Image (tube, grey):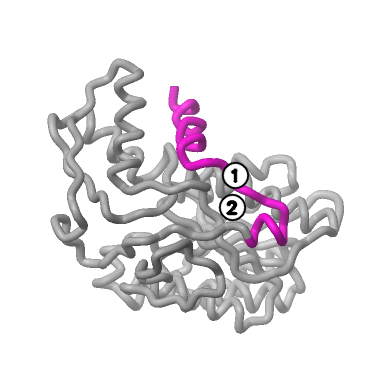
Amino acid sequence: MSGSLRILISGQHGQVSHALQNSLKGLGELIVLGREQLDLSQPESIRPVVRHIKPDLIINAAAHTAVDQAESEPELAFAINATSPGVFAEESAMLGIPLIHYSTDYVFDGSKDGLWNEADAPNPLGIYGSSKLAGEQAITASGAQALILRTSWVYSLTGRNFLLTMQRLLQEREKLTVVADQIGAPTWAGTIAHSTRALIERWRDGRPGQWGVYHLTASGETSWFGFANAIGQELIKAGKPCATLEPIPSSAYPTPARRPLNSRLDCSRLQREWGVSQPDWHDAMLECLAQQR
């Protein structure tokens, strides 16, 4: 496909959607629909909207991402994270257009020693992960041309996320405890958006890879404690106050939803199939923070 694209993006104010709106400029017409125009808690309401817009590509950047809250509202989580992605996929298949959908490391239980690859069997620990896995399965069952991109530990300069929370708490407190036994790759929403643009350009230029499930995170790994420490070091460099950090195990910070201890995803398949790779997590964090100054 060549020329200007008509791209429907679900989700308006989320971290990934916000980044996509910046990164995809120039590719064509971006039709960004928030909850008022496209309510994913009512999946069947999606069909007439998609059919009216007639996009060339759908990007589902909306999700129920409140991991702990999902434990107490499973029906809502499944409507948004499972049923609605299935409807998007069915409409994509009917229109003969691709769908790009974002999933999560939480589809895994974190018990593996090494990197998780796309062939590993999912085993979610909670409602959020279960609902996201069900969304993946619904998309696959639709037969649509779809990219399901699993990412992890998403942050940005908008919304609610670990980076912004740590920046605030580290400057407000003298001492802060952070979980140190959960390992993964903090992934800037800008990295996800840049990679998504590269994938779209490959498809637009007639050089797509294989459709299916892929892992898309920053490269490298750290713990939440390591991520917090890196954030703190940048505060210190900027001459700002920074609390003393203390590492703790997950058992010392109980939450309604269990988190996987190992969230490290192997992203090599995306490089092989689509020629798209991601920067080191720390380098991406610095690029993100540079936009804050």
Pick the front one: 132 or 279: 279
Mark 2 highlights which residue?
Answer: 32
Q: Magenta stretch: residue 41 in it?
A: no
Residue at point 46% right, 75% down?
Answer: 133
Under mark 1, the amino acid is Gln
Q: Is residue 259 above or below residue 235?
A: below
Q: Percent from the top left, x then y, of residue 157?
A: 42, 37
Instruction: Evaluate whether residue 36 shows in this view.
Output: no
Location of the C terminus by quadrant is top left
Which residue appears at 68% of the width and 76% of the height?
144
The residue wearing badge 1 is 21
Q: Which residues are magenta?
A: 269-293
Q: Where 147 falls versus 286 (above or below)? A: below
> Mark 1 vs mark 2: which is more N-terminal?
1
- Please identify the dominant SS of the magenta region: helix
- Rendered image quadrant of residue 146: bottom right
